[in-house]
Amino acid sequence: MKDTTAGAAVETAAGYGIKPSSSDGSHLLVRRAMQFTMFVVGFAVLWMFLYNTASPFGFHGFSHYFIDESAKAGYDPKLQSVLRNASMKDKTVIITTLNDAWAEPGSIFDLFLESFHLGNQTKMFLNHLVVITWDQKAHARCLALHKHCYQVETKGDNFTGEAFFMTADYLHMMWRRIEFLGTVLDMGYNFVFTDTDIMWLRDPFKLFYKDADFQIACDFFNGNTYDLNNSPNGGFNYVKSNKRTISFYKYWFNSRNAYPKLHDQDVLNKIKKNSFISNMKLKIRFLSTSYFGGFCQHAKDFNKVSTMHANCCVGLDNKVNDLKILLEDWKKYVALPENEKNQSHPSWSVSCRTSFGRAKQRKQKNKGWLRRRALAVTV
Ligand SMILES: *[C@@H]1O[C@H](CO)[C@@H](O)[C@H](O)[C@H]1NC(C)=O
Ligand SMILES: *[C@@H]1O[C@H](CO)[C@@H](O)[C@H](O)[C@H]1NC(C)=O
Ligand SMILES: *[C@@H]1O[C@H](CO)[C@@H](O)[C@H](O)[C@H]1NC(C)=O
Ligand SMILES: *[C@@H]1O[C@H](CO)[C@@H](O)[C@H](O)[C@H]1NC(C)=O
């Protein structure tokens, strides 16, 4: 692309040249032509630079962009079919990702599905839930329990086991997720992404902001939904498909190269204040933990809670244990007579956060401690 432009510039510049009659005049003309060429080439390079700055695709992405545009029809027909079947009227789907460890009977996936049945009017959302699976076993398990399953082609990746936090497998899996979600936006679908260790207790759509492009739950919410200093948790977000979000997801995904040791959420924290994002006017909102809570910060009022996330809790067994307790708490609340629901003030009897805190203190004493943020996430 650059070469062609430069070539064209030389041709144009040559067109201005008058055949030299003397060696002095020739030098002058050559210099003029050179200056003009430099100007045009410089302009072309500047244009390329601006274009690349304004677009998130980096150098390689440049051609990638056009391929994407022209190959709109080239998406996996299976994925198109799954999304179409699961879509709400306004082209919104709910997406979760699943690997084998979480899909085991009695594990997180079972609890996740159960929450839709126990939640207040959340059962219907199962019709719109697409489960993305990373391996054959999880896929088989999904098909046995649910109607919208899609297996991502992983070509040699093996996400079967529990992907331990911040290992190479874990990072890879997280980035595949961002890439995949970007594709979903590209295909024109809005989505709610939800981790599987999030319990759906009430309709979240009633609580989403109408005018936001990208809204995301928090580990810790500081009270201001606009404040970029909130600690977002990538495990739950609602994203509308539009030019800004498509571009944002590409930018986010490409930013992984700049921070090879960080996962998607920490990279989001790095880039959320970038001028690229403020310039594109992406409307970001942070969701209050009063409604979209977790073990880090509980949604304290049972009358308000929409979702609860087993964040700030390390280890599959701990998560499963506490999510079971959480669902029991919820069932007890639901069983209360209507007039008592607002009078009694139940609290969640989960405890993983406490053990998480203890583990943290122990580790802090032993030095080798990861930063708090690094652990206060979906594991
Ligand atoms: C989508 O739904 C149609 C009609 O119910 C069905 O024939 C098709 O197999 C479904 N597609 C997928 C990928 O499940
Ligand atoms: C469930 O939702 C219905 C309809 O919105 C409402 O009348 C009822 O009070 C809700 N129950 C609980 C436990 O939130
Ligand atoms: C994937 O890893 C699991 C253990 O985590 C192993 O049992 C399985 O054989 C591996 N599958 C492939 C295709 O390498
Ligand atoms: C209970 O209070 C919440 C606000 O805290 C309100 O939204 C809800 O409608 C009330 N539910 C009942 C059953 O009165």
Image (spheres, rainbow, N blue to C red):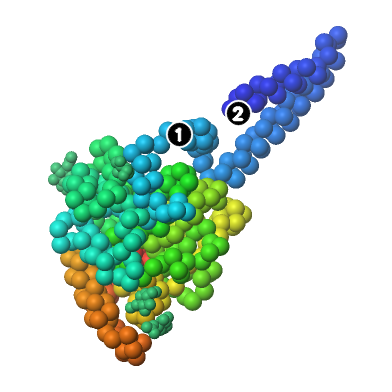
- In the rendered image, the quadrant that contains the C terminus is bottom left
User: What amino acid is at disc 1?
Assistant: Ala
**Residue at point 62%, 36% (across, down):** 48
| Residue 108 on image: x %, y % | 22, 62
Above or below: residue 35 compared with residue 183: above
Q: Amino acid at mark 2?
A: Lys
State whether residue 226 appears in this view. yes
Binning the other alpha carbons within 10 Å of mark 2 as few (below 14), some (14 to 19) or many (20 upward) gives few
Name the image quarter holding the N terminus: top right
Q: Is residue 160 visible?
A: no
The residue that disc 2 covers is 2
Q: Nearer the viewer, mark 2 or mark 1?
A: 1
- Ligand 3 resides in the quarter of the picture at top left
Q: Is mark 1 within 8 Å of ligand 1?
A: no
Vertical order, 279 against 153 (above or below): below
Assign a secondary structure to mark 1: helix
Which quadrant of the structure image shows residue 105? bottom left
Eyeballing the image, is 135 above or below 207?
Answer: above
| Residue at the (38%, 62%) spot, across then down | 236
Depth check: give the residue in front, 256 or 287: 287
Among numbered discs 2 and 1, the one appearing first in the sequence: 2
Residue 8 percent location from the top left of the image: 68, 22
In this rendering, the answer to whether 41 lies above or below 114 is above
Please tell me which residue is depicted at 15% across the width and 62% down the height of the picture.
106
| Residue 45: x %, y % from top left | 64, 34
Give the CA distance from mark 2 to mark 1. 28 Å
Q: Quadrant of residue 321?
A: bottom left
How many residues crowd around disc 1 within 10 Å: few (fewer than 14), some, or many (20 or more)?
few
Q: Which mark is residue 73?
A: 1
